[in-house]
């Protein structure tokens, strides 16, 4: 700690700021804070001492928003002065903490309606930076539970084999299931590969003694049902995106 960071009694002058900001967050939450203040608060957990305000400014100068800071790779974060490898890894892992929290809640609170389930998978996968495939079992009461990530990366449906499905079905002990995967930054409209893979997956589930009731695709515009062959939830933020797709189609026609 620099001498300039201490008061006349030798105490860190930034401790008061940290205390006040923490008290504000505990009192009113993060919504009323600026991006700089939110990022400062996050950095308190990465850097337990010192003034992180200049670092928060440098991060926002490079990444523009708090969510893009959290989504950045460790390598990109390390390009910012003041971020070493360990700090970059800690920042990068914060989203995993959130995802773990979201996923674990399902184990304790079975989802009773399709609307509840769509709310959950939207929160789980809508903003993921890479494609993921998840499977969810449905119990005899019609409640969705026992979620599990089957694959990550491109072409997730292609990468899953019969052994993966059989292991899940035998462990979860369910007779009905849903699949969900996301199209990061793209439309929820399924690709031809998605359609072919869905038919293949239905056969695999049937072979293991479990019925695949539907497969959902989460995109920037909404959630698509493979079984119903339509978008069953439109995201309000995606309306402009949908309109642009319709415009492109009309121009091509």
Image (spheres, rainbow, N blue to C red):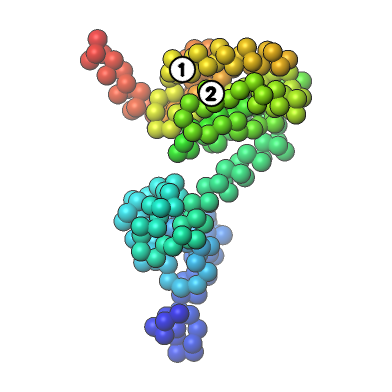
Give the residue at x 24% y 9%.
253
- In this rendering, position of residue 89 left or right of residue 138: left
Comparing 75 with 145, the one in front is: 75
Give the residue at x 42% y 48%.
72
Task: Judge whether 208 appears above or below 107 on screen.
Answer: above
**How many numbered marks does the figure carry?**
2
Task: Judge whether 96 appears above or below 17 on screen.
Answer: above
Comparing 187 with 88, the one in front is: 88
Give the residue at x 63% y 39%.
103
Which element is circle 1 on?
Answer: helix
Q: State the mark number for residue 193.
A: 1
> Considering the image in quadrants, where does the N terminus appear?
bottom left
Q: Quadrant of residue 35?
A: bottom left
- Name the residue furthest top: 253
Residue 149, x across and y down, in percent? 60, 33
Which element is circle 2 on?
Answer: helix
Find out whether the residues at labels 1 and 2 contact each other: C-beta distance under 8 Å. yes
């Amino acid at each position: 700690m620099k001498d300039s960071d201490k008061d006349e009694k030798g105490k860190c002058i930034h401790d008061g700021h940290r205390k006040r900001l923490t008290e504000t967050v505990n009192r009113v939450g993060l919504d009323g804070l600026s991006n700089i203040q939110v990022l400062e608060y996050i950095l308190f957990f990465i850097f337990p001492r010192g003034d992180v305000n200049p670092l928060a400014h440098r991060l926002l100068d490079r990444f523009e928003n708090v969510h893009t800071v959290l989504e950045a790779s460790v390598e990109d974060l390390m390009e910012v002065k003041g971020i070493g490898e360990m700090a970059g890894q800690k920042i990068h892992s914060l989203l995993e903490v959130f995802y773990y929290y979201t996923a674990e809640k399902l184990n304790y609170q079975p989802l009773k309606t399709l609307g509840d389930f769509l709310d959950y998978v939207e929160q789980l996968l809508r903003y993921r930076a890479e494609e993921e495939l998840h499977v969810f079992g449905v119990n005899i009461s019609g409640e969705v539970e026992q979620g599990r990530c089957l694959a990550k990366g491109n072409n997730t449906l292609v990468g899953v084999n019969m052994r993966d499905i059989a292991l899940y079905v035998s462990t979860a002990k369910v007779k009905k299931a849903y699949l969900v995967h996301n199209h990061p930054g793209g439309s929820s409209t399924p690709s031809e590969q998605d359609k072919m893979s869905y038919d293949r997956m239905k056969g695999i589930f049937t072979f293991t003694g479990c019925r695949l009731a539907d497969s959902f695709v989460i995109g920037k515009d909404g959630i698509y049902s493979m079984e119903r062959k339509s978008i069953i939830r439109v995201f309000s933020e995606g309306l402009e995106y949908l309109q642009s797709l319709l415009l492109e189609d009309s121009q091509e026609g």
